[in-house]
Amino acid sequence: MNGLTEATWLWLAKATGAVVGSAISLAYLLPSGRREAAVRFAVGVACGFVFGGTAGLKIATELGIAGRLAPGELVLMGSAAASLCAWSAIGFVMRLLSGGPGRPRHPETRDETR
């Protein structure tokens, strides 16, 4: 194996999954600007690194294929999935913090005729 340890391969799989998941999430729903794209990409990569192993194990267990995959495959799959799902979670949190759909975002936009 090219002299690389198993831990190195796992880190490479985690990085690859995180970056690919972030790139897919940006292509899936285009951001409105460069800043939003950069933030979504960075958060996706971070979530892929942090939750990659756990997400991969959970997905494989739910699908019943945990024993058939190598550790690198589990980490790659989990990192990509966690990274891909990160921007959806960010959108959900931002919607909650902004008052949710149907609510005005700024006090000056309230309808005063009620």
Image (spheres, helix red, strand yellow):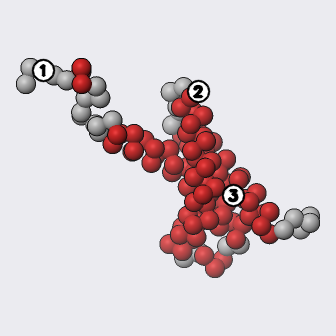
Report which residue position mark 2 lands on: 34
Residue farthest front in this picture: 107
Q: How many marks?
A: 3
Residue 4 — which label?
Answer: none
Amino acid of disc 1:
Glu
| Nearer-N-terminus badge (3/1) | 3
Amino acid of disc 2:
Arg
| Nearer-N-terminus badge (2/3) | 3
Amino acid of disc 3:
Lys
Q: Secondary structure at mark 3?
A: helix
Question: x%, y% of residue 34?
Answer: 58, 27
CB within 8 Å, label 2 to label 3: no
Residue farthest bottom in this picture: 67
Question: x%, y% of residue 68?
Answer: 66, 77
Left/right of residue 9 with respect to residue 96 in the rendered view? right
| Nearer-N-terminus badge (1/2) | 2
Report which residue position mark 1 lands on: 112
Left/right of residue 13 with respect to residue 65 in the rendered view? right
Residue 14 — which label?
Answer: 3
Left/right of residue 9 with respect to residue 36 in the rendered view? right
* Real-space CA distance between mark 1 and mark 2, rounded to the nearest whole angstrom: 36 Å
Can residue 37 be seen here?
A: yes
Question: x%, y% of residue 95?
Answer: 35, 39
